[in-house]
């Protein structure tokens, strides 16, 4: 049985209202498993040392999904978990992870989820990760996700990661190593409020002939929040890499971008684009001429930007 | 009815508009023309509320809207198509047309506006209004957006500028159709002879003042007869082509 707080978090993070009755899933609640199911093609097993789970997806598994949300409703809780995904060759699956914290106390609630993906040849995965924090207690919500991807030949990984509210501090570390013909597309959306701090770090090695990486980060820093965006694309063969950091700053928000692109092969094509600034005045004016108030125009622009 | 009474505006110590008085009757198709730098765009911005006059009054149907915000004027029935349309990351063409219409719009209804401006709706309706669109595409979307508003006063600031690969005749058709369908006034800032030719009324603004107001029959020969007048049209041809 899940309590209502956990159910709400589950709906926000994974789009499901309760423990599912079918499909592969593992629901982690306050550091313990609250429900798990394996299917014929997707096995979820605990690691022997108890540090996390292995998700083993059989080669050729198509059109299936696996949900592994982690939820915290207790204050003074530090949850650390190591989850490994083994995706068989030619599989095509959707993986929904993410973390929700509801901290009613004055202590720190923290989740550190360390995920490794071993993506087999020609496999395709869509990985969706949503992080939210809430609670009235004044205690800090901290989420530090790590995503490490080993992409074999001609595999395709799309990662959507979103954090729009309630997380006081986050350090998001992602890395990928790409073999020949592999593609990784990472889309990140972040909004910070109050005194929040968000740090993002991407480190991608483009090791194989014809591999490609696209990193797109869109963020909004409001109030006195701060963000740091770091990205490093290393082109070691004929490859294509593109990173893009686009940030809107409001109030006293601060955003720093530190891109790095390194071409170790004459046929590597690497691009970085970064733009940081407040909402353009003519954008507000245009929407006001359509009848929106300045506040409505601002929220329309932000919502579109983070859509 | 839109009325400007003794409107003056200056910026950076320079007088841009000097004591402009103008009456735009309902359901009129009015073209404002005149040399570049004469104050035409500023006048449109003053009407839309983007700039506030230093002195003078603006009346809409007899109500003084001089101190109204952009939003209040928009909701009272003033629309403004920018000379240089704005780009938005993440806001789609459909979002913009829906916001403009002020109500939930079906995709089919939004598509009709795009078809009017010669864009294949299915290719554009879900596109973001960002830098992937050309200047000409943006301009047409801008026109579709103000068409969706159906307001009593619609201002266009040089709609012909940047209209590429789309026959100029279509633009004229759009204006004529709008004029017929929306029972409102259309004010177009333009140098284009063919737009001037469909005007009920032509206003010449020069040096920040109203130099002449009249029907096209009254005003156009004067413009053509003057060396400087011909210059506007040459510039306009250059813009369009």
Image (cartoon, coloured by chain):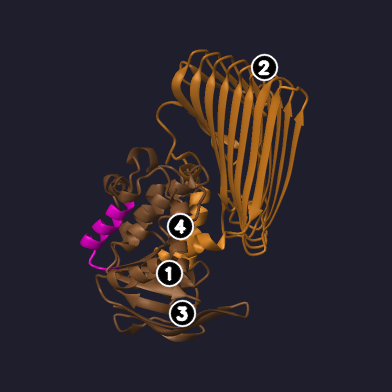
Chain colours: A orange, B brown
Do the residues under discs 1 and 3 have CB atoms within 8 angstroms?
no
Question: Percent x, y for residue B229?
Answer: 44, 67
**What residue is drawn where x is 62% and y is 77%?**
B12
Q: Earlier in the sequence, mark 4 or mark 1?
A: 1
**Residue pointed to by mark 1:** B226
Q: Badge 3: how crowded within 10 Å, few (<14), some, or many (20+)?
A: some
Q: Earlier in the sequence, mark 1 or mark 3?
A: 3
Q: Which residues are magenta?
A: B171-185
Asked if badges 4 and 1 are on one and the same chain, I answer yes
Instruction: Note whether A217 is above or below B105 in the view shown.
Output: above
**Residue B184 among magenta residues:** yes
**Residue pointed to by mark 2:** A209
**Residue pointed to by mark 3:** B209
Residue B234, which numbered label?
Answer: 4
Find numbered disc 2 in the image and state the secondary structure of the residue it sits on.
Answer: loop
Separation of disc 4 and disc 3 at Cα?
Answer: 22 Å
Separation of disc 4 and disc 1 at Cα?
Answer: 13 Å
Separation of disc 4 and disc 2 at Cα?
Answer: 55 Å
Do the residues under discs 4 and 1 have CB atoms within 8 angstroms?
no
């Amino acid at each position: 049985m899940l309590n209502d707080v956990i159910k709400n978090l589950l709906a926000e993070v994974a789009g499901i209202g309760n423990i599912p009755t079918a499909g592969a899933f593992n629901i982690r609640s306050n550091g313990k498993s609250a429900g798990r199911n394996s299917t014929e093609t997707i096995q979820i097993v605990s690691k022997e040392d108890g540090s996390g789970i292995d998700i083993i997806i059989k080669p050729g598994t198509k059109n299936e999904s696996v949900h592994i949300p982690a939820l915290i409703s207790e204050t003074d809780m530090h949850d650390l978990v190591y989850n490994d995904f083994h995706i068989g060759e030619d599989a095509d699956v959707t993986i929904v992870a993410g973390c929700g914290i509801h901290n009613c106390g004055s202590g720190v609630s923290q989740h550190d989820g360390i995920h490794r993906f071993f993506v087999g040849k020609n496999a395709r995965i869509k990985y969706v990760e949503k992080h939210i924090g809430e609670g009235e207690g004044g205690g800090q919500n901290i989420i530090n996700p790590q995503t490490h991807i080993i992409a074999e030949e001609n595999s395709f990984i799309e990662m959507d990661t979103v954090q729009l509210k309630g997380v006081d501090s986050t350090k998001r570390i992602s890395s990928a190593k790409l073999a020949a013909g592999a593609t990784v597309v990472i889309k990140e959306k972040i909004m910070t409020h109050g005194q929040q701090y968000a740090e993002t770090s991407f480190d991608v090695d483009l090791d194989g002939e014809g591999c490609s990486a696209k990193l797109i980060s869109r963020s909004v820093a409001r109030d006195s929040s701060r963000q740091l965006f770091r990205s490093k694309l290393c082109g070691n063969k004929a490859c294509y890499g593109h990173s893009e950091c686009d940030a809107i700053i409001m109030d006293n928000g601060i955003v720093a971008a530190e891109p790095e692109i390194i071409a170790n092969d004459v046929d590597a094509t690497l691009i970085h684009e970064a733009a940081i600034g407040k909402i353009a005045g003519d954008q507000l004016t245009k929407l006001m001429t359509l009848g929106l108030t300045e506040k409505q125009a601002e929220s329309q622009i932000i919502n579109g930007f983070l859509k | 009815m839109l009325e400007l009474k003794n409107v003056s505006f200056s910026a950076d110590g320079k007088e841009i508009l000097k004591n402009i008085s103008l009456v735009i009757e309902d359901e009129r198709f009015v073209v404002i023309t005149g040399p570049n730098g004469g104050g035409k765009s500023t006048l449109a911005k003053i009407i839309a509320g983007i700039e506030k006059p230093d002195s003078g009054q603006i009346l809409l149907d007899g109500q003084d809207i001089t101190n109204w915000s952009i939003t209040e004027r928009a909701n009272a029935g003033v629309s403004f198509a920018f000379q240089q349309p704005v780009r938005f990351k993440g806001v789609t063409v459909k979002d913009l047309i829906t916001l403009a219409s002020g109500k939930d719009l079906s995709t089919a209804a939004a598509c009709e506006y795009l078809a009017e401006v010669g864009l294949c709706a299915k290719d554009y309706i879900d596109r973001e209004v960002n830098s992937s669109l050309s200047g000409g595409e943006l301009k047409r979307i801008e026109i579709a957006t103000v068409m969706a508003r159906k307001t009593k006063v619609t201002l266009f600031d040089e709609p012909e500028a940047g209209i590429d690969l789309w026959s100029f005749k279509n633009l004229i058709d759009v204006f004529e159709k709008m004029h017929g369908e929306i029972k409102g006034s259309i004010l177009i800032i333009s140098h284009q002879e063919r737009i001037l030719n469909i005007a009920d009324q032509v206003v010449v603004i020069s040096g920040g003042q109203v130099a002449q107001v009249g029907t096209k029959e009254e005003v156009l020969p004067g413009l053509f007869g003057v060396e400087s007048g011909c210059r506007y049209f040459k510039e306009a041809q250059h813009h369009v082509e």
